Image (spheres, helix red, strand yellow):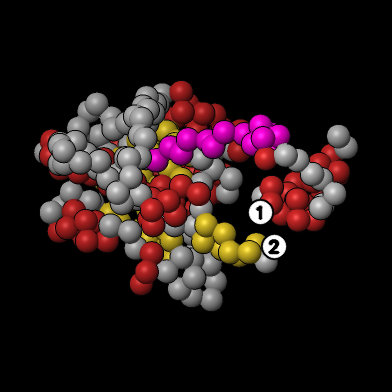
Amino acid sequence: MHAGRKEDLDRYLWGMEVIDFLNEHPSAKFSPEEFIGLLTKLQPRLYSVASSLRAFPDQVHFIVYVIRYESHGRERKGVCSSFMAERAENVPVPVYPTSAKHFHLPENPDMPIIMIGPGTGVAPFRAFLQERHALGAKGKNWLFFGAQRESCDYAYKEDFDQFKRDGLLTRLDCAWSRDQAHKVYVQHRLLENGAEIWKWIDGEGAQFFVCGDARRMAKDVDAALRKIVREQGGKSVEQANEYVEKLKSDKRYKRDVY
C-alpha cells in the first residue's frame, strides 16, 4: 500500500468500530454466523500491579482509568475498563499473572532510583515504594508523576504524602497538564531538574525507570534524558546517545511502556 494511502486508512479507522463501518456501508451483509466468524478474539489486557505482596500479602491492587468518550455519534466505553468499573462485581473475572522480567527494583537496596510514571504508569512505582518500605531499603527514591488535573487525577496522593513524611520518598515532582494555560508534562519536570538528575545518575549510580504511554510520553522522556546527559554531562549528541545506550545495556534504564 502506498504510504500516503496508509495514512488515509489509519485516519479513517481511528476510533472506528465494526458497527461504524457497517452503518456506513449497508450493502455489506452477513449471516450472524458469518459475522461472528470474521471477528477477532478479544485481546487480553495487561495491567501493572500497583501493590507489593510484602505490604498486602492477600491482595493485588490495580489502577484503572475508565475510558468514556463519544465517537461517530455514539457514546463509547473502554471494553475492559468499563467492565471492571461497572459490571464485574458479582461475576468471575479470568486473570493470569505474567512477569515483566526486565522491570524490577535493583538488587542493591541502597541504590537510588528515579521513577517516571504519569497516569496509570504510576502503578509499579507505588509497588516499588511499598516494597522498599517493607524491606527497610535505604536507597533514595524520586518519583515523577503527571496527569491532567491535580484536583481529580492525583492517583495515590495519600500514599505518596505518607511516603514523603516517612522519609522513603526523597523527592516527588508532579506535572498537571491542564491546571494552567500552558501544558506541563513529566518531561518538562525532568528538564527543570536536569542537574540533580545527572548527579543521581552519573554521580550516584541511580537506575532510571519509565512506565506508561509508549507513543508519546516514553519518547519525550527519552529525548529529555538524552538532553540532560548532553547538557549536564558536557557531551556531544553522539556521546550522549552512547551514554544512554550504555545505561540500557547495564540495565540501569528500564522501560515498561505500552
Q: Secondary structure at mark 2?
A: loop
- Counting from the top left corner in percent of width and height, residue 165 is at 15, 58
Q: Is 110 on the left or on the right of 218, as rendered? A: left
> What is the crowding at mark 1: few (fewer than 14 residues within 10 Å), some, or many (at least 20)?
few
Main SS, magenta residues: loop
Specify the farthest residue to the right. 2
Residue in the image at 46% along x and 23% along y:
249
Q: Which mark is residue 15?
A: 1
In the image, the segment drawn in magenta is 33-47
Q: Is 77 on the left or on the right of 126, as rendered? A: right
Q: Quadrant of residue 69?
A: bottom right
Taking depth in this image into account, of 96 and 220 the one nearest to the observer is 96
Q: Are the residues at dot 1 and dot 2 in contact (C-beta closer than 8 Å)?
A: yes
The amino acid sitting under disc 1 is Gly
- Counting from the top left corner in percent of width and height, residue 217 is at 53, 49
Foreground label between 1 and 2: 2
Residue labelled with disc 2? 72
Tell whether position 44 is magenta: yes
Q: How many marks?
A: 2
Taking depth in this image into account, of 15 and 206 the one nearest to the observer is 15
Residue in the image at 32% along x and 40% along y:
92
Taking depth in this image into account, of 163 and 253 the one nearest to the observer is 163
